[in-house]
Amino acid sequence: MTLLITNAKPYGEQAVDILVEDGVITEIGTDLVSDDAGVDTEVLDAGGHVLLPGLVDLHVHLREPGGEESETIETGVHAAALGGFTAVFAMPNTDPVQDTAVVVEHVRRRGAEIGLCDVHPVGAVTVGRKGTQLAELGTMANSGAQVRMFSDDGSCVNDPLIMRRALEYASALDVVIAQHAEDHRLTEGAQAHEGAVAARLGLAGWPATAEETIVFRDCALAREAGADLHVCHVSSVHTVAVLRNAKAQGIRVTAEVTPHHLLLTDGRLTGYDPVNKVNPPLRTGTDTQAMREALAEGVIDVVATDHAPHAAQYKDAEWAAARPGMLGLQTALSVVVHTMVEPGLLDWRGVARVLSEKPAEIGRLPDQGRPIAVGEPGTFCLVDPDAQWTVRGAGLASKAANTPYEGMRLPGAVVATVLRGRVTARDGKVAV
Amino acid sequence: MKHLLSVADLDAATATGLLDTASRLKETLLGREVRKLPTLRGRTVVTLFYEDSTRTRVSFEIAGKWMSADTINISAKGSSVSKGESLRDTSLTVSAMGADCVIMRHPASGAAHRVAGWQDKDAAVTGTHTSVINAGDGTHEHPTQALLDAATLRDELGAIAGRRIGIVGDVLHSRVARSNVLLLSTLGAEVVLVAPPTLLPTGVAEWPCRVSHSLDAELPALDAVMMLRVQAERMHGGFFPSAREYAIAYGLNENRLALLPEGAPVLHPGPMVRGMEIAPAVADSSNAKVLAQVRNGVHVRMAVLYHLLAGAPE
């Protein structure tokens, strides 16, 4: 199988033609013609758009098994392909929980059957994500699912002793522990960022210190364990300071920020529409600004969506009863263009770094996030940087429609996605 | 006025208009044997309460009945709510049955806003409008309580603008405090919140009021003081060490009453915890206006129903 991509600008630079044979880039040049053109060659006219390595998302909720009314692996993967993603990490808060080899292998297999995007199940750190007993990390790591990231996401591994043991144990397996940093004692009943907006709306506060203190603690534990720690969805300016300090000490910590924490603030909570309810909560403009600067600087390593579909009945409720989470896969790139590229905080090399190269490195994926060069995988995301589009939840591929960007006009559109030489999405349609 | 969800939606003129209507209704009914006005005959008012409440629900019910509205009470217990029906479905069911007004109390902040949003969406389809009155949503607001407090303060002080009002106690968990801070400042009063830091929300600095931790220092310069209920169980959340220490530092006792200007009114939204935030002797003193508040509550709620259902008299 051969794919010829013409007139593409890798990282927004010089336009080239790229030949991909059997999933691997075999030639890069100008005016390339496939040897067997017309027989088994697909031609993708890139129209002078920006070519990036396929995007990698370290944090999605595909809801299957157990939450199929909100999303299935299939609908989630469609959203991923349309969003430019070629690999996603599926969080374990499923039912049953992804805490055994059987469940993670099922998720990996379903992803492979659909084939549009690599699906890597994240294993739970503790049995049932209950925080008390380590799950079989080694068995999951060595299973057919080849689990490389573990997290109790949705819940924090709150017990410091369990977290210490998890990090120590993981250090021998070449896997990373991804922490949902939230001291649950400090967030009992919490509904919104603790600050002026929550005070006015009478919503119990989720203090930023609940994130900051866990990250501080975990960095110290990771240092002593010599383990890799990944911090999920950083949301507070104070956490950035902790991360900067830890990295300066050489602690092996990486961190992600979500598109919504780059763009949205708690000012949106007026009116109590739970589409804006998410955990960690939307914070202030000071925080979004700090997220952007930290991402540009590399203190925060990657953007991960925390794509969290919820069927209408879970959002069409009073604030306290509604479930936290928002869609992210199909809007992530546009939000990054809006918040990072347009203000000049990141160039396209930088976008490739935070949405593809670094996440692939953290997730230990050898064939994702690779340079666009001969001999490398033919895995890409093609972006029209000048396109503008209006977000409509009903038009997104996810089963649920809970996008916080409804009606918003965003810049940058994914034109095509290519996974190992196969076009998985093109012009807003999934290749089936 | 379409709904009454938050005091923030009331400007000074609208709020004053409601208070004026309330006092006119009070005068009209004064000394009457038959306390019934025909204004809302044929209108249906439903109280939909998801929390236990006696005084607010009964006050609204009496207000409706004195205006000749048909009043129906739905308590969340024993209704389809306990079968797991969503707030949306329950509220739309009530309006589909013909309720002109739904008076809501709910433990979730913002619940009345949500219901009003669903009602408006439904009204766009059916053409029949249902008003929503927030009778207390979580720790957010309780607008009619603030209105009845303002009515009482106006009776006692002659005016609200330029007066200094202290609000003392568990501000953090109090919807009464939120509504009162907004309404009293809108009406031109100077508001002072007095509480330990643990019972004040982070972000209170942006409210239109001043904050103090010393009741003794504030009392001499207050024109009126409003005591908030403090639940003794809060000590288990670490909000204060003990009921005893709270009462010593923030309770209004006889010695503190003497610090207030003579005759300064003492308000309490009830139910009072005697011995905690207010000493029995103070609660029973001539300064205490608790029952006047309750009386005003009926007239204020009549005024709100009148403005919402019969159209505001300009």
Image: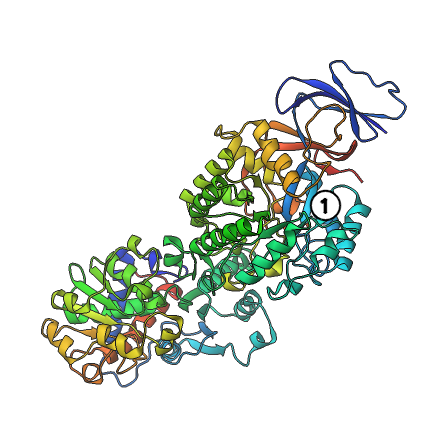
Q: Quadrant of the C terminus of chain B?
A: bottom left
- Quarter of the image holding residue A99? bottom right
User: Which residue has dot 1 on it?
Assistant: A77
Question: Could one spot residue A286 in this view of the protein?
Answer: yes
Relative vertical location of residue B233 with respect to residue A99 in this rendering, above or below: below
- Identified at 25% across, 77% down, the residue is B247
Q: Nearer the viewer, residue A304 or A389?
A: A304
The residue at 44%/77% (across/down) is B70
- Above or below, comparing residue A254 to residue A155 in the picture: above
Residue B30: horizontal and vertical position, in percent? Answer: 23, 79
Residue B71, percent across and down? 44, 77
Image-quadrant location for residue A378: top right
Q: Is residue B194 left or right of residue A140?
A: left
Quarter of the image with the N terminus of chain B is bottom left
Tag 1's secondary structure? Answer: helix
Looking at the image, which is closer to me, A378 or A384? A378
Residue A191 placement, left or right of B125? left
Q: Is residue B24 visible?
A: no
Which amino acid, by three-letter code, is at mark 1? Val
Residue A50, position as x, y percentages in the image: 64, 25
